[in-house]
Image: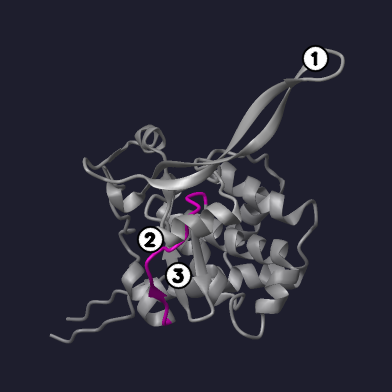
Amino acid sequence: MTTTTAAPERLTTPPEWHDLLKAALEMPGEAGNTYNRFRRFSLGNQVLLMIQGLFEPVNTYKGWIALGRQVRKGSKAKSIYVPMFRKKEDKDGEEHQYLSGFKLVPSMFGVSETDGDDLPPYEPPTWSKERALAKLGIGVVPFAEIDGNVQGYSTGHKEVAINPVAVYPFKTLMHELAHIVAGHTSDEQIAEYGTHRGLKEFEAEAAAYLILNELGALEQFNAAESRHYIQTWLQDQKPDEKSVRHVFSTADKILRAGYPEEKKEEA
């Protein structure tokens, strides 16, 4: 008896991928709140938080509560500089606010100092994240960004890091895998990535968009928000055929890496 389990055969790009990509480029998107849930820190405050030992997303006590997380009892708040303003009348008697200085205020807590209901890890029924990572030779490392609005990042060492409080962690993983598989973080392309970041972000997000549609994982991301991300980075530019083909080949490589290889058992 012979049993076979194999990745879906893909000799050519599925026709529906062209339609999906066209929709991503042309259908209305929406900004959403994925990238603005956390306050943004000045470089000085980022360094100050790092000096205090924080290398992870941070928020105020009330900020974590709003995100459904509770700061643990006994946690010590870390300090940031907060601008102080005073009111002063001008020569016409009108009152104006002006910056009078900065005050050190203990108010920030790292995500590791909080408890909350984390999203359960998502695993498509016919596709394995672990298998894909192994075949692609990509490792997952701890997230070490203070800005909680950063959903994830990838490195030239073929490593990805996903924000522990990412809104859509599975989609973010696909986006970061796409950056690496597309070669954006390689030594050869890293300079080009800085120069043409809009195009590279389009390629990574478009590949993730196709992958999640292919896996039937539509509940794992906001398609309209993804379209907005793509359209914002392109800034009304139209990607050329080479870039579109790159999106398709990147999505295909990641999908193939996660599907089981053909297995035959003779009985």
**Mark 1 → mark 3, Cα distance in angstroms:** 54 Å
- Residue nearer the viewer, 119 or 64: 64
User: What amino acid type is highlighted by mark number 2?
Assistant: Gly
For image coordinates 52% across by 56% down, the residue present is 46
Dot 1 lies on which element? loop
Of the two numbered discs 2 and 1 in the rendering, the one whose residue sits closer to the viewer: 1
User: What amino acid type is highlighted by mark number 1?
Assistant: Glu
For image coordinates 66% across by 85% down, the residue present is 188
Q: Earlier in the sequence, mark 2 or mark 1?
A: 2
Q: Where residue 111 sits in the image (x, y, percent)? A: 35, 50
Q: Residues within 10 Å of mark 1 (few under 14, many from 20)?
A: few
Q: What residue is pinned by disc 2? A: 53
Q: Main secondary structure of the magenta part?
A: loop
The coloring applied to the image is one colour
Of the two numbered discs 3 and 2 in the rendering, the one whose residue sits closer to the viewer: 2
Q: Earlier in the sequence, mark 1 or mark 3?
A: 1
Give the quadrant of residue 159.
Answer: bottom left
* 13 falls in the magenta region: no
Task: Farthest residue to the right: give it.
Answer: 92
**Mark 3 → mark 2, Cα distance in angstroms:** 22 Å
